Image (cartoon, rainbow, N blue to C red):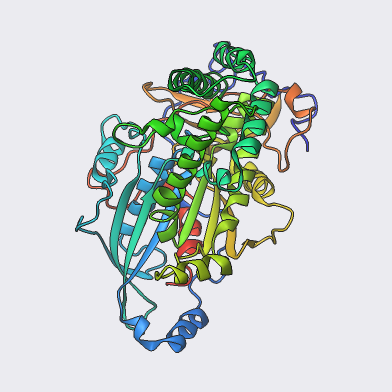
Amino acid sequence: MTLAMPGLQPHTASPINGFPGSIGMASDLPHDPVLPSSTAEETPQNWFGLPGQLSELKRNPLDWWRPRTVRIGVTGLARAGKTVLLTALAATVLTPGALGGRIRRARLAEAGASSLPRFPFAANIAALAADPPRWPDRTDATALLALDLEVGRPGLPARKIRLEFLDYPGEWLLDLPMLTQNFDVWSRAILARLRAGPDTDAVRAFLQFADALPVSIEASDALAQSGHDLFVRALTSLRIEHGLSWLQPGRFLMPGPGSQPPWMAFFPMDSRAGLCSLLEQRYEAYRASVRTGLVAPLFGQIDRLVVLADLLGALHKGSVAFDDARDALSAAASSLRWQGSWLQTIGALAQGRLPSRTIRRVAYVASKADHVSERQRGNLRRLMDVLTRTGTDQPTMVGNAQRSVFAVAAARCTEDFVWSLDGHPVSAVRGRRLGDDSMTRSYPGEVPDTPPDQAFWTHPFLALPTFEPARIRSDGKGGIPNIGLDALLGFLLEDLL
C-alpha cells in the first residue's frame, strides 16, 4: 500500500497563510464547508426490490397488515461515535421522503411500558443545533429509541413498522467471547495479553500482585477484592493511556446500573489454589449473568446489528492500538456465531419457550469517514471488511446472517478539497475546529486497505482534529448532513421496504 506520494512526508506540512505549522493546524479560511445532506459510498444493491416484498407477501399475506417490530442493535468499540450515529440514523428516518420516499411517515414512538431507559434523542439534537453546535454527551448504559413507521412502494398498501434502535455499550459486546471460554482458558489469555501489551504502572502493579500469590493460597474475599481492584485499574490504564478496546470483562469498565453483586469481584489467575476456585465460581456467575442479562433480553430480541469502530483513530494511536482494535473486531465477529443453532432452538422448545430471534443482518461500520477525503473512503471500508471477515465467512455472510461493510460520517463536518502540500497535490479535508472560529485543513496520511505492515508505521498517521458539527435546524427536521447513512439504512431495512 502506498503511504504517501513520492517525495512527500505525510507528517510534514507547509505553512498556511504565512504561519508555520503542521497538518491540521487552524487557518483563516473564509467560509464554512459546503456539506451535502447525504453521500453514499456506493450504489445500493436492490434496496427496495419488489420481488422481496412479493415473496414475503406470498409466505403470509396477513403479515403485510400486521404491525411488525424490528429491533436494531447499535454497538461498537469505545469512542467510535455510537451516540451520534444513532441520533443521525433516527434523524434520517424522520426526514420527509427518507430513503427515496419508501418511508411514507415516521414519528418518535411513545415510551409505553418498556423498562429500558429512553435514548436522549431530543437532547442530542439540541446539542447539534446549538449556537455554536456541540457534540452530544456519550451514553454509558443501554437505551432504546423507537420510531413508528409507515413504509411501502407506491401503488402498494402502506405497512406499519415499529423500528427500535437499541443502544448498548460496546464493552458488553466484548463479553460474548467469554461464553465459550472456561476460567482457565480465559485467565491464561488475559494474563498473556497483559504481559505482552503496553507497560503501565497499573498493569505492572496487578501482575506483581498476581505473581506473588502463593500456589497454595486459600480462598479470601479480601484478597479477591484487592486483586479485582488492581485488575480494573490495569484495564482502565490501558484504555486511557493507550486507547485499547480489547479489554475483558467489559462490565468492569462499564458497570451496569445499581450496586454491583459480590461475584463481580474476580480477576484472572493461573493456578489451582483455593482462591482460584473462588474466582472461578465468580467467573461462572458472571458468565451466567451475561447469558441471562445480555444475551437473552438484548441480543435475543435483536433482528439486525450495527458494529461501529473508529479505525482512523486506531491508525493514529499506533500499531499496538490498531492490533488491539483488530483483535476486538475479530472476536466480536466470531462471537456472533452463537446465534441460531439448532441446539439452541431445541433447548428453548424443551424449556417450554420460543427460541430467541436470530440476527439476520450485521453491518460493520467504520466511523468518522469525513476526516479523510472521498478518495480514501473506499480504502477505509475495505480495511473494515478485512478486519471483520474470519476464515469461514463469505463476502456477504457472517454465520447465518447477511453482512455488509460501510464507511460513514454520522454528522458530516468537513468538505473535501485539494491541498498543495510541499508542492504535491493531496486530497485533504477542511472544517471548523471545535471551539475555534477559523477553518482547519487536515491531511493525516494515506488510509491502508489492508492491515498495515511495519513500513506503514514509519510515517505516523496524524491526529485528526476535533471538528465542529455542521449546523442543523433546531427542530432536527431536514436530517443531519452525513456520509453513507442512506446506504447503511438501506441494507438494514432492505427486506422491509
Mark yes or no: residue 419 visible: no
Q: Nearer the viewer, residue 185 or 9?
A: 185
Quadrant in the picture for residue 61: bottom left
Question: What x and y, as percent, mark residue 334?
Answer: 63, 51
Horizontal relation, residue 453 to residue 493: left or right:
right
The residue depicted at 23 percent of the width and 59 percent of the height is 109
Question: What x and y, as percent, mark residue 138?
Answer: 36, 34
Which quadrant of the rendered structure holds the C terminus?
bottom left
Compared to 268, does 104 lie above or below? Answer: below
Compared to 305, does 81 lie above or below? Answer: above
Mark yes or no: residue 458 visible: yes
Compared to 323, does 154 lie above or below? Answer: below
Horizontal relation, residue 257 to residue 19: left or right:
left
Quadrant in the picture for residue 132: top left
The residue depicted at 80 percent of the width and 29 percent of the height is 6
The residue depicted at 54 percent of the width and 11 percent of the height is 19
Question: What x and y, as percent, mark residue 429?
Answer: 55, 34
